[in-house]
Image: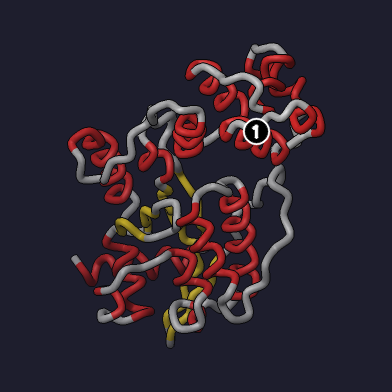
């Protein structure tokens, strides 16, 4: 609570606390945020200290100016005493059928190269046949009967790690990305819990990263098991302008062969499975 609010006996408004926290994490002054949201600095100051309550429309303007996720926009609305605006539906829900069809098409068209779909905690929700083939080859069919987590698969000592030839570089790149996503969602308790689990894994180093810094492109992943050697380079796709929390948080991880030999190996695996 700032000294002025204390002097007049105000208790911080929950929405004000959230706004101030997000603004500080983005290194924005009250003047910066007020300008971006098209409101007065005085009004913003009163909202942050709890001297005045913000309308639903003002909270949404501030959320947009801060670039908040749909999950965080819902949290801000609830803190301000309003109902959530954005739904959070399962991928099997009829309301997201069009998006689900688009994702299915992406996965099929990426064959014979691996692609997976993950949620905000990096849990694998879907995998195309190429990804399933490769993971089965490396981890065994029994492991494929249990849930998979993209980060843990590469970082945990008992999953893909023994087959990653350049594991230190891959682990460093993945942890930078995980740290960036965790810092961007400090109120997401489920994501924060997963992040803490990753930090407790053996030999995994916690990266130092400011929220304003974006992670660099993922490095090449070199996989080897016996005589099989495959290099992959990943790209992460997100859905454009979704109006559903679940859809906004989905990540489509698409892996391309890093060289001609890797491409030939993936094509050969697909032919064997045809």
At 29% from the left edge and 36% from the top edge, which residue is drawn?
99
Indicate the colouring scheme.
secondary structure
Q: What residue occupies the far bottom of the structure in this picture? A: 226
Q: Which quadrant is home to the C terminus? A: bottom left
Compared across the picture, whether 136 is left or right of 249 comes to: left
Location of residue 58 by image quarter: top right
At 30% from the left edge and 47% from the top edge, which residue is drawn?
109
Q: Position of residue 71 (x, y in %)?
A: 45, 39
Q: Could you tell me which secondary element the residue under label 1 belongs to?
A: loop
Q: Which quadrant is home to the N terminus? A: top right
Whether 254 is drawn above or below 27: the answer is: below
**How many labels sit on residues?**
1
Whether 204 is drawn above or below 53: the answer is: below
At 44% from the left edge and 83% from the top edge, which residue is drawn?
225
Location of residue 270 by image quarter: bottom left
Compared across the picture, whether 1 is left or right of 260 comes to: right
Near mark 1 (Cα within 10 A), the count class, few <14, some 14-19 or many ≥20, is: few
Compared across the picture, whether 248 is left or right of 183 comes to: left
Whether 21 is drawn above or below 163: the answer is: above
Compared across the picture, whether 226 is left or right of 174 comes to: left
Residue where numbered disc 1 is placed: 11
Which of the pair 225/7 is nearer the observer? Answer: 7
Q: Position of residue 228 (x, y in %)?
A: 42, 80
Q: Position of residue 250 (x, y in %)?
A: 40, 46
Which of the pair 58/136 is nearer the observer? Answer: 58
Q: Position of residue 194 (x, y in %)?
A: 49, 63
Whether 19 is drawn above or below 130: the answer is: above
Location of residue 40 by image quarter: top right
């Amino acid at each position: 609570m700032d000294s002025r609010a204390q002097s007049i006996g105000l208790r911080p408004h929950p929405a004000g606390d959230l706004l101030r926290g997000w603004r500080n994490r983005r290194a924005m002054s009250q003047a910066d945020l007020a300008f971006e949201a098209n409101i007065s600095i005085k009004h913003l100051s009163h909202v942050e200290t709890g001297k005045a309550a913000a309308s639903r429309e003002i909270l949404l303007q501030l959320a947009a100016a801060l670039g908040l996720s749909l999950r965080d926009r819902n949290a801000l609305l609830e803190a301000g005493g309003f109902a959530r605006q954005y739904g959070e539906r399962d991928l099997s829900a009829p309301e997201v059928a069009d998006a689900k069809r688009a994702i299915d098409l992406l996965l099929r068209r990426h064959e014979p190269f691996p692609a997976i779909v993950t949620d905000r905690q990096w849990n694998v929700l879907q995998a195309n046949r190429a990804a399933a083939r490769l993971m089965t080859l490396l981890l065994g069919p029994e492991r494929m009967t249990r849930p998979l987590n993209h980060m843990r698969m590469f970082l945990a000592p008992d999953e893909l790690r023994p087959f990653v030839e350049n594991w230190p570089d891959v682990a460093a790149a993945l942890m930078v990305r995980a740290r960036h996503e965790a810092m961007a969602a400090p109120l997401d308790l489920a994501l924060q819990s997963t992040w803490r689990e990753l930090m407790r894994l053996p030999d995994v180093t916690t990266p130092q990263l400011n929220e304003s810094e974006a992670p660099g492109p993922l490095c090449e992943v070199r996989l080897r098991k016996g005589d099989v050697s495959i290099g992959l380079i990943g790209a992460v796709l997100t859905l454009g302008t979704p109006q559903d929390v679940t859809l906004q948080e989905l990540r489509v991880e698409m892996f391309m062969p890093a060289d001609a030999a890797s491409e030939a190996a993936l094509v050969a695996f697909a032919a064997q499975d045809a």
